[in-house]
Image (spheres, helix red, strand yellow):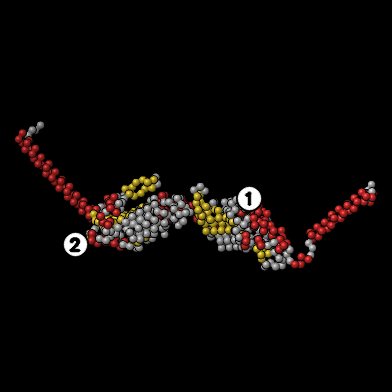
Amino acid sequence: MFVLPPRMAMNNRSVFINGNSFVSSFCLLLSIFGRFVTASIADVDAGEESLTLTTTSMSPSMVRPTWTVDQSCVNWTTALEAKDGNCARMTRLGLIRCHGGMNNLEAITSKNGKLMMAHQMVLCGWSQEVLNQLEELQRFPQLRSLTIEYGDFTEFQFVFPEMFHLQAINISWTNLSYISARTFKRIYALKILDLRWNQLIQLEGPLILSRSFQQLYMAGNPWNCTRNFKWLLLQPEKGRLVADRENLICTDRKYKELQMLLVMHYKVKLRRECQSHMDLSNCTCLMHFFTKFYGPVYTVNCSHLQFHSLPSYLPENTTTLNINNNLISDINPLRDNPHYQSVTDVHVNNNRISNIDVLEDTYWLQNFRFFNLHGNLLQKFHVYALDNALNDNHNANILMLSQNPLHCTCKFGMRLREMLTKYKDVVRDAWNVTCTYMHGDELRLAKVLSLTREDMCNTNAENDILIHPIDLLNCILASLIILILGKLAYDYYFYRYHGRVPWIVMKMP
């Protein structure tokens, strides 16, 4: 092995030491230069890493964006600028933070007459009811991220201006209650929109967003599910963009605390079911309400559609049928059609129904809740059957019978008056139920509850002179009874005092 002389080896070692020192110095210079370049790129390129959202799993079905500390307005009132409604600029991150206003925005965004770039903007605590300074965003064409939090504004006065680099918008913890479908239309690079924890009640429809859009967050708003959110299911390409759609909760009275997707699922199902059946193709089918225990409750409205009979089909869980102002004369489906088993409210007013006796002793008549027969062609019906049904039916709430051409004969009229008096709380229009009671004068109407027995049983003056056959028979029977009793008393008297028996006894064998 070749060995260097001691002196030569020492000199060579010093050379390597000096060489390593040179390399270390060079690397140090590169590191400093790299940091300078990185800082410059951060100012020019908006700090792409600052736009990256970390995700935390809130539930198995929901992934929510977590904005960085620089992009949040937590404790914004403690900032010095909050006192005067001013903005502050953080040059290293290309970030502008405004606290309660933008009073000094022009001063901090220009230097020596030149516009300084900004890539992130945070607006905290906007105190006015309308956010009307969206046009100020055009000062920052390179803006990549926008956060608006803790504001009192309820709407945007204008839609967002054209922005070609803005990728993420967070509007949270404000009083925002209205957003137009076109609000974000001109933000061409938008990928993430966070609208959580505002006061949004409805959307006009799916928002018009860029082709590159990825995630929309809407949880934490007091959504009114009576509005049209069926697009979440009917337009899958739009619905899938709502990343937290399984966590949208209804707050309206009808569907309070129910999951919006569940409510919309049943609404879409009902819509398809009604449209697929010929009898209901022109009817309106609505989900009346939804309970956690019994599920959806439907209402079918077929009024003013020239129906000649009740629909042969109704969706399952239909409880209310409105079929007013049609030409219906037959109500047999209430008796034997299984699709009407859960129907408790039937509105058939202003039709041509002349007979309801077919419902006698039926399950439906003993369990109905609302039955509106106002304005039909009823002349008579079995009062005892309706009386028995109302007596057994603890669900009966309203029965309407007025505006029918009822004819009060003595027997029917008296029974009808007794029933109306007995069930005034159920027959809500009892005082408006009228009938005719004069032979030959069908236009003379009177309120049933105001008629007396004499009115209904003595129909005209001529009949007052004539003796009724039944009354004549009663007179004959009474006379015979008196005659027999008199003859018996006569025979008894003569037998006791004279010992003479009646001659008929003498003739008997």
Q: Please tell me whether mark 2 sits on a helix, a strand or a loop.
A: loop
Q: Amino acid at mark 1?
A: Asp
Assess whether mark 1 and mark 2 are in contact (beta carbons under 8 angstroms).
no
Frontmost residue, 503 versus 5: 503
Which circle marks residue 112 in the picture?
Answer: 2
Instruction: Residue at the far top: name it.
Output: 1
Which circle marks residue 392 in the picture?
Answer: 1
Q: Residues within 10 Å of mark 1 (few under 14, many from 20)?
A: few
Q: Residue at x 92, y 51 (%)?
A: 494
Which circle marks residue 183 in the picture?
Answer: none
Q: Please tell me whether mark 1 sits on a helix, a strand or a loop.
A: helix
The residue mark sitting in front, 2 or 1, is 1
Residue 368 in the image, given as x and y percentages of width and height: 59, 53
Q: Is residue 287 left or right of residue 83?
A: right
Q: Amino acid at mark 2?
A: Asn
Residue 97 visible in the displayed image? yes
Q: Is residue 228 left or right of residue 499?
A: left
Q: Residues within 10 Å of mark 2 (few under 14, many from 20)?
A: few
Q: Earlier in the sequence, mark 2 or mark 1?
A: 2
Residue 41 visible in the displayed image? no
Q: Residue at x 39, y 50 (%)?
A: 244
Q: Is residue 339 left or right of residue 57?
A: right
Q: Residue at x 65, y 61 (%)?
A: 449
Residue 425 in the image, given as x and y percentages of width and height: 60, 56
Give the distance between the C-alpha atoms of the residues marked 2 and 1, in whole angstroms: 91 Å
Q: Is residue 184 above or below residue 32?
A: below
Residue 278 in the image, given as x and y percentages of width and height: 55, 57
Residue 325 in the image, given as x and y percentages of width and height: 58, 63
Instruction: Residue at the far front: name it.
Output: 497
